[in-house]
Image (cartoon, helix red, strand yellow):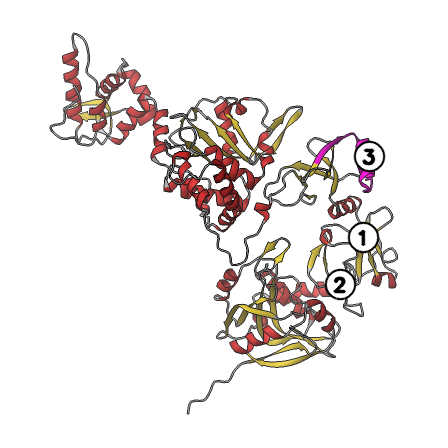
Amino acid sequence: MERKQECKTYSIGVCQDYDPNRDKLYNNEKVARGWCATTLEWTETSVRDFTKKQAVSNIFSDGHKTNDSWVKTTFIMLDSDDGDITAEQLISLQSAWSFDSYIYSSQNHQKEKKGKICDRLRVLIPLDEPITSLEDLEAVKAFFIEKFPWTDKTFLDRARYFAHGTSEISSFVSDKGFFKWRDIPNFESYLQKAKLRTGKKWKRTSNKLIKISDVVLDSNRDQRKILDILPEESIYCPYCGMSDERNGDQHNATIMLNDNDLPFLFCQSCKSRGNGNDGVYNFDDVDGLIYRYHLEDKILFIDNIRAEYYGGCYEQGLDEFIIRCLGSKEHAVQFCKYHKIPVPEIYPRARYELVFESDKLFDFEKGFVNKYSATELIKMPVPGNHSAKLPVYIGKLVDHILAHDQDIIARFYNDMAWWIQKRVKLTTAYLMQGTEGTGKGLFFDNVIKPIIGSQYTTQTDQDAFGTQFNSYLSENIAVLVNEVSGNFSSSDSKNYSTVEKMKMAISDVHVQIEGKNINRYNGKNNCTFFFATNRRHALTLAEDDRRFNVAPRQEVKVANTSWWPGYYQLRDLIKDEIQEFVWYLNQYPVDVSLIGKVIDNEPKRILQTMSKTNADMFFDAVKKGDLQWMYDNVIKYIGYDSLEKDLKIKNILKSLSGSDKCRTDDLCLLYNNINGKNLTPVAFGRMASGYIGQAKQLRFGDSNKNGFPIQWGEVDEYASVPF
């Protein structure tokens, strides 16, 4: 009889007082004690059922979950709560690991955190032997943080515990063996660094300043910046909170406000040991003000660019947060007194600029106060398990404006999705052509403007590019340029021409910004451009244009389509669809390789052809050996010797059929005929060198002549010139 294979087992710490049916607050009060070791089978059913019902931690000597009671660690639990990795990405990584593991979802999986919905995941990895020394534990921890930077950095703390999870995400691997931590590559290097860290002792601190960028552990041992901690909220002291010299392992500090409404950090443990300033640690002066601003809807700062005082608050009668220039320092002081916020001795400084990609009102760590306030349409996360679809009427409107060209429409959605997902300017633009009333302005006003925000979008004409002031580039995010026209194919270096400024505005991210009464400075161009025209062939584009996607011309007014519901009805329908449209763009699978590239299609080639001179077209045909083009474009001479000249042109064309070269004299005669010129062979040769290179000595019959090596095509033997 075949012997049944012995099942692998592993040891793990569990809490007898933990109740998976009670909330986190209840269990946090129960898990300080009551821990014991248990042995479990490493099978998918066992592991899944266990992790859905029980909290887990390390093995403790007396059942007390503290650093001092820690005996050994028997497993690794990687923890990702902030959406730094998705379930799909993690499961894909798991398949390449050389050890057993179980991926599962936490009980808060796909719940909102810090304004976003994200996967919250755990990875249970059993160890082939327990870790029993602090140095080894720190070395293994450093290895995993380096290998898996998305994991919570406290995942291997001695007194850390993990609540039960769910099987919404469940991926079990059991055929690779438990993790052999002693076989970690370069383990000795990790171990030496760990010994240096664990050898450091906590020292008395009296002159430390708190920075808002400092990271502390909150009461749940989650890492958070000081800036995000509220007054009176319990935290672990950044100086002694996790020290081995503390008797307990509970949070022991909080942030408080003094009589001047400025923050300080107070630690009871430091006070009892006579550390700090009687347990008090002060904030850096400027950071203290920034912390206060973060608590209220008020802000005061000096703009780095204009060197002026600015104050911001919600004003009566307005829904938006308003930031205004305060002028003098006296007015800044009055602002503080009126709004009951501290009067600074040193004012925070930052760039007052539009930061489209950020939802933050300010980020002094990155040095900006944001002019942009994101709309609720952009900030609203896609509901869990919702698969957004292209709304009916917005889809119909886009299809009509872009004249049903599926290639342009697909590229348009790809670009729009990247624009909304990344919130970074597009360096290409769309030219929408059509008769008046095709819906170009209607789309911009009722779709683009509500999504981006009306104060950050504008419609203009190309005259706006002709002025010396261009501050609108840093103040707007979307611009519709109506009735555009111009020659974008010009190679003239007219740095201040309207067209040159339009080119720079479309493609350049960093530009020189100049406004009225504002000195020129290096600024950021936030504008994504849409161009619209009712004229035919309004633009002339260069053959190598890299800025414009050109839609075909639409000759039908949108009101004349079969689906048109009426102007006001369409506006209401779009209003009802617009959030779904934003979600559709957020979920759209963007092909990043297409961003910044344009489509070469027939509507664009028409505009490019218009930019070519007669010489351009002639030499394009020569380079291609397009003899048929020559046949189609030669003209009949007029005059007393016209018969002789016509015959000479006919003979030249016949001699070129299938030939691999052409005499300079013959090519000159063809050029003069087609373009109505009278160039000499020498003058023609100089011009031709710029298109097809220098003429060479080639063999023609019994003699050498100047000519060009051109592989000419063949024409039908019965072909004739059009005269």
Instruction: Name which of mark 2 and mark 1 comes first in the sequence.
Output: 2
Q: Is residue 521 left or right of residue 541?
A: right
Q: Which residues are magenta?
A: 323-343
> Which label was assigned to residue 334?
3
| Front label number (2 vs 1) | 1
Residue 693 visible in the shown view: no
Task: Tell me the residue that label 2 is attached to.
Answer: 200
Residue 230 - label: none
N-term-proximal mark, 2 vs 3: 2
Residue identified by numbered label 1: 208
**Total residue callouts:** 3
Q: Residue at x 51, y 56 (%)?
A: 386
How far apart are the two marked residues, 2 and 1, measured between alpha carbons? Answer: 18 Å
| Label 3 packing within 10 angstroms: few (<14), some (14-19), many (20+) | few
Where's the C terminus, which quadrant?
top left
* Image coordinates for residue 700, horizontal then vertical, percent: 17, 25
Residue 671 forms part of the magenta stretch: no
